Image (tube, grey):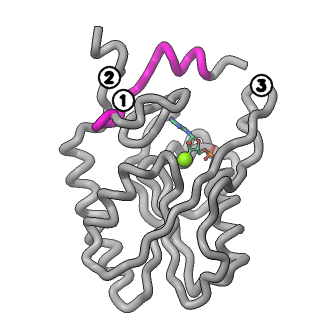
Amino acid sequence: MRGKIFGKPIITKEEMRKRIKILGQQITEDYADKDLLMVGVLKGAFAFFSDLTRAVRLPLHVDFLIVSRAKAKGRSPGRVKIISDIAKDLSGQDVLLVEDIVDSGETLTFLKKKMIERKPRSIKCCTLLDKPKGREVDVAIDYIGFSLPDQFVVGYGLDFEDKYRNLPYIAVLDKISERAKKP
Ligand code: IMP
Ligand code: MG
């Protein structure tokens, strides 16, 4: 019963730990001579962000954005809105946006544009999960944890109806996700 509620694990805690260690090493090398500001996109990125920042061996800065999608009709996800923002001036900063998952690419495209307007020295993106089949807007992602098929996943920060974020691994909620997809 418990397994049914939490869904089938597709990425285990151990796989996550190993992958984040490698991503942390890559970011450490790439940003060795830079002034790194890691920006976590909440709520979804909270768990990944916390682990990833601690895998980077640099004296970096952290900040957070809270975003939400305004409700829209049918399957359309609605407009992306920033509910809580970071500092406006990013001059001189090497910004790394950290997302939980990229699906259509709309959220990341929107956030990247918003960051570029603030003139950082550089901007790159990192996502724990990528669902390339769902892509509707082409957006460059510099660091990807895992690529997944087009299925709805929860855990490790990712939610379904704002629940399951505390699950310590990534799981598929088959039945629930089928319901979620219907208009
Ligand atoms: P995009 O704008 O379509 O790329 O969607 C990205 C956002 O949709 C993510 O930040 C998540 O909040 C949400 N999302 C997309 N796929 C999933 C999923 O499988 N599980 C949980 N949230 C998801
Ligand atoms: Mg998100």
Rendering quarter of residue 57? bottom left
Amino acid type at circle 2 is: Lys
Residue 148 in magenta stretch: no
Rendering quarter of residue 8? top left
- Find residue 45 and name its label: none
Amino acid type at circle 3 is: Gly
Give how far across and how far down residue 31 sits, in percent: 38, 82
Q: Which residue is mark 2?
A: 8
Q: Given contact means CB atoms under 8 Å apart, are the residues at marks 2 and 1 in contact? A: yes
Secondary structure under tag 2 reads strand
The residue located at (62%, 57%) in the rendering is: 108
Asked whether 34 or 89 is in front, the reply is 89
Furthest residue to the right?
A: 73
Q: Label 3 neighbourhood size at 10 Å, few (<14), some (14-19), many (20+)?
A: few
Does the closest atom of ligand 1 sit within 8 Å of the Cβ of label 3?
A: no
Ranked by sequence position, the earlier of labels 3 and 2 is 2
